[in-house]
Amino acid sequence: MQFEPSPEVQETLQSLDRLLERDWADLAPAEDTSLKQRWSDLANLGVLGICIPQTYGGFGLSADSSVHVSATIGRRLCHLPYISTAVCCAAAICAGATEQQKHEWLPPLAEGRHLWAIAYLEDSNEYDIFNCNTRATPKGEEWTLHGNKILVMDGVHADFFLVSARTHSSDPPDSNSSEELALFIVAKDTAGLSIRNYRTIDNRVASTLSLDGVTVKKLSRLGGSNAGHALTMALSAGCTALAGEAVGLMERLLSLTTDYLKTRKQFGQPLGKFQVMQHAAADMNVALEQMKSLSLYAAHLQDTEQAEQAAGAAKIYAGTSGRRFAKKAIQLHGGMGMVNEMPAAHYAKRLAMLDCWLGDSSYHLNRRMNCQSTT
Amino acid sequence: MTNILYTPEEEKFAAEVICFLEASLPTDISTKVFEHLRLEKSDYMRWQSILAKKGWLAANWPLEYGGQGWTAMQTHVFDELCAIHGAPRLVPFGLRMVAPVIMRFGTEQQKKTWLPPIRNNEVWWCQGYSEPNAGSDLASLQTRAVNKGDHYVVNGQKTWTTQAQYADMMFCLVRTGTDVKKQEGISFLLIDMHSKGVTVRPIQTYDEEVTVNEVFLEDVVVPAGNRIGEQGEGWTCAKFLLGHERTVLARVGDSKRELATLKRTISQADPRGSAPWKATVSQRLALLEIELAGLEVTLLRALNSKHLAGPETSVLKIVGTQIQQDISELLLEVAGARALPFDPEWKSLSGRQHADGCFSAATIASNFLDLRKLSIFGGTNEIQRNIIAQRVLGL
């Protein structure tokens, strides 16, 4: 098991951190047209293809390196479409695409020429990938898609979407079967696709996609019949990376909090001298260490049969202990923890909302318990 | 595969350990561990003699002291597998506590005198640290040792001394100087428990067991050659030792064994095993499993890093003890009203037979009550939080 990044990865992370500090700290949460230009800088560092096999233009490193990249991004609270593009969509393509599709789509992703977003959430599917109401109907050499996707993470930046849809028109849909679930590659300017972008409370941008007779080529269907597996792998990789982001958020938020406790004085001494504050901060340190461990654990198991369960475990911990951590940080800052111009407030906000992305704790706990009761 | 986190070499080593455990661990002893029954001195001695014969009792010791030179990771794999298979925990006071101190601070003569009997399971050690007025504030201890040239005369009282009733020797922190900073006036003495003036008085705990004792020291004569390190260097020895203890207190193997028991109990629970009830307890079980997976990796990170005994290891003690306590509490809740009937006699193998049937959960409550000690001993979890706040976070 890889406990520390290798010296090479360590070097990349340091370059990445310098780059983020220099160029990305001021990135506005809303649509930012300058992102595209700066995105290739990340590609040049090798960050975007870090987990993509070398055959397809990546570096073929193990999943823990993408955990460290996410942690580095989290430490700077940068709103990068890294997880959606380089983790989720890259993983889906790696797991579910044909050889030809991999050669076609992965190199431009790793080179930073294409940005991607994954569109699987629907209004009422409660994070369940198989509960999918978007329809794909075959028509000659093409597929026609009808449906709506919500909360597409970083959709505003995407050149391509991976859209989940059911290929059968059975009514009512058999939600337990993954056989007919498919993933389609849809370019952002395809006719019939309308995109509505909106901010989220944690300063990200999400999109709602309306697919009204979107027509794509046969070859735009990802791989064959194992789209459920590809999507599961994509979300597991995403959860693992989000757990990595939680590590970075926690690390910085804890240091902001201890800085505050050392400088703010009440009753004639720094707050950090009060044992009740010390113990709260110590508990945050405990959570941080456990979060680091669980993110590495999920990365370590990424290519095994336990991948989903381990990623779920890391995500559950990021969701539950992350929110607890955020609440404690705000409390230790007193009113200052709620002031919009305080960086700590924004770290806390992102950390508190992390649970809602890519399946919340209840969802992953239920998945876990269902898997265990059937084995 | 034994453990997905092990390397291929560790996996191979684990297979060897499992093979040995399956062949050599007496089932009457492992039954006691699995069912939270009382372990007698003879159980510990029998198991440790089996290990000594195999050369594995002190296998974590360096080769020069007659150990196998196991790495910290190998030692962890061994401890974990022993716990999972229901072996009694090694009595740590000699093997894992005083021995490293003697190796680090002792003279050649002291090493020759004290280490072989520990390795051969011939001497039972206990730890004389806490006193009635020195618990968490250990450095304020008052047991006095007056230097008389070739010997010390010791007067005072130790308390919470685990298994002192079985012990032949006690390593002890004593005050040898009063006009210096309180940490600097402490020395590390090895006291023969059979000496004149040593009195052991058992403390019965609320589970009606006796594992801890008071030890009274009245004009006890201790040869000067029994002092480890220089006079006034005792606190350095104590700190060295405490760092060792915290990684051990993570007790990942114990928690894995108890989680397995908990899972079995939940699936067998009837007639309370309705679907909503199962869902509720299973959810809490899942959260404990996740916390434990994190702990295991946190431990492996510590074992594979250079600064093993640093203040960072306090995290292991806090999380490890919390998990063990939470599992014992969930076990208690799963047992429900069946945890109520109790007779200390049912904690022995022969007594347990009478307790079968409706009294089968009789040891679960006493186990829960007993395990409250985990967040108290080895430096309370509050002290661990002080250490993290002050030495890791710089508050």
Image (cartoon, helix red, strand yellow):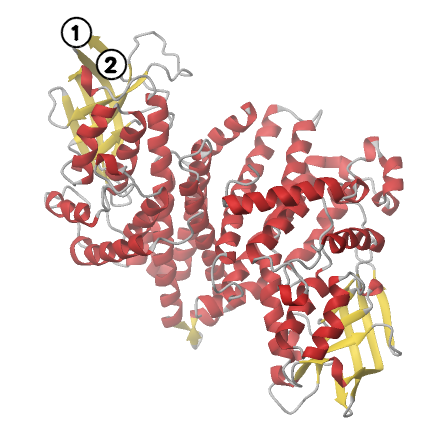
Identify residue for label 2: A136
Nearest the viewer among A365 and B219 is B219
Q: In the image, A211: left or right of A280? A: left
Q: Which residue is drawn at 26% across and 54% down?
A: A12
Task: Classify A259 as above or below B340.
Answer: below
Chain of the residue that carries numbered disc 2 in the rendered image: A
The alpha-carbon separation of the residues under discs 1 and 2 comes to: 13 Å
Chain of the residue that carries numbered disc 1 in the rendered image: A
Q: What element carries label 1?
A: loop
Quadrant the C terminus of chain A occupies: top right
Task: Classify B172 as above or below A211.
Answer: below
**Count of numbered badges drawn on the protein:** 2
> Closer to us: mark 1 or mark 2?
1
Residue A257 appearing in the image: yes
Q: Where residue B227 appears, x then y in whole percent?
A: 72, 81
Discs 1, 2 touching: Cβ within 8 Å: no
Q: Amino acid under label 2?
A: Ala
Q: Residue A140 carries which label?
A: 1
Q: Amino acid under label 1?
A: Gly
Q: Residue at x 65, y 28 (%)?
A: B267
